[in-house]
Image (cartoon, rainbow, N blue to C red):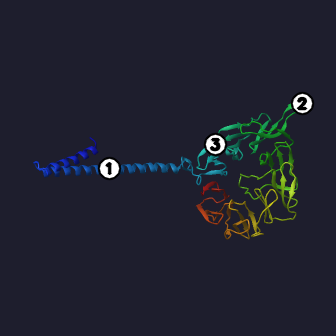
Amino acid sequence: MNKLHRFSALLLAVVMIASLAACGKKQPDIKEQVKNTMESVASDIQSEAEKLAEKAKSSDQAGNNHADEANSGTENTTENGDKTSGDKGLDLEHASFDYVNPFSEGLAWVIHKGQIKVINKEGKEIFKTDSSSYETDIPLPFKDGVSCYNVGDNYFIIDKEGKTLYQTKEYKEDDYEQILAYGNGGFLVHRFSKGFKDGKKTGGHTMGMIDKNGKEITEFYAVDFTPEEKWDHLCDGVFYEPLDGKVFDTQSGKCSSIGSNVDSIGNDTVSTLSVLRSITAENGKVWVKLSTLHGLGIMDVHTLEIQEFNYKDDNNIFIIDDIGVVDGVYYNLSGEKVAEISAYMPNVIRRGDFSDSGVTPLVMNDGSCYITYVDKNGKDQFDPIKLGNEWSFTKDHFADSDGTQVVVYDNTGKEVCRKKVTDHKDLRLYDDYFIAGKNYYFFK
């Protein structure tokens, strides 16, 4: 009989004895029996209560033990002293990174203890190469679910799980293959072959595009130079190499120099610390900075023809994604005026893109740096805030360091978060995190 049934039986006995007494039937020592029964019931109730209390105490202790175990899983220490978080992923604020890359599609390349790795935003290692950091260049950021890295002379295309989709051909004598950039759904590739047949040279340098599995998606065209290793995609399968100023069209095979009158293509306000350098081009057009005229122009990426803007020696020119700024006037790639913001000129040294709410950052310098955000009519959103030695901004937030901590604000000047940071060098701000020194700090 279980405890519940026994308790019910005792109560029933009390009720029966009381009923018999009420009926006037003679029962020996009826009061004494009721008293004894009640005492027995009370004793059982007290015993059961004590057992339940002890059981609850044991359960609480077990729960605490489980919580301790869970907490030990969220922050622990590896053999080499790195803190971990989550499911044994690295604590990104305290991990001993040798190098950090910005996140792209939720993944980032890092160098950790001399090893090239891919991590996610929880610090979990997704993939690592079989080489040390000295054997590879900075890998391409993930785009359309794929990335590329090299180990010495061999290049590998991988997916977001780290699976190798394609490996370049191995060096044989002087023949080799290099992956230079990604864009327009494929990888720009440089191939070289000595290629002699019947005493005549049949090889040389060629360039073309392959897909993520190594299949050729354009023809490979001969070029009369040795391409540099870093190229940027403009648009429509046209790539730009900034060191020598060359533009290569993978559809036609045309390779041209942008000429001595063009100083640079694309965004000249992007931090040199960010490896996610990109050039915004639309409808076959891209902004260029003119060296001979000291102004801006719009270039057709296929014909390299340039529509010039201003003709005076003026330092107040900027390229911000798909916007060109001349003396505070903002133009789109169709040459149409978007906004005119002359506030705080001529002290403006940096500008940014427009946010969805229609405001844009201005950084001024009059001996010290200040920042505010203004709308398309030039109205500021808050009084300019003085910046420290390390600062960074996006169209929606800006970050400032006072040497002990980094404070992040939104584009209305409202403080979003502040974090103590040990290394404040190379402060870089992104949509939901910033990089300071060689670690990540999330503020959303």
Residue 393 lies left or right of residue 249; in this view the side is left
Return the disc, 2 or 1, that comes first in the chain's sequence: 1
Q: Residues within 10 Å of mark 3 (few under 14, many from 20)?
A: some
What's the residue type where badge 2 is placed? Gly
User: Contact (CB < 8 A) between labels 1 and 3?
Assistant: no
Q: Quadrant of the C terminus?
A: bottom right
What's the residue type where badge 1 is placed? Leu
Q: SS at mark 3?
A: strand
So how many labels did they put on this image?
A: 3
- Along the line of sight, the residue nearer the viewer: 47 or 336: 336
The residue labelled by disc 3 is 128
From the top left corner, tell me how far across and down residue 267 is, in percent.
77, 56
User: Contact (CB < 8 A) between labels 3 and 2?
Assistant: no
> Could you say which disc has been placed on residue 52 in the image?
1
What's the residue type where badge 3 is placed? Lys
Tell us which disc is closer to us: 1 or 3.
1
Q: SS at mark 1?
A: helix
Query: Which residue is found at the position 65% from the left and 38% from the top?
Result: 163
> Could you say which disc has been placed on residue 199 in the image?
2
Q: SS at mark 2?
A: loop
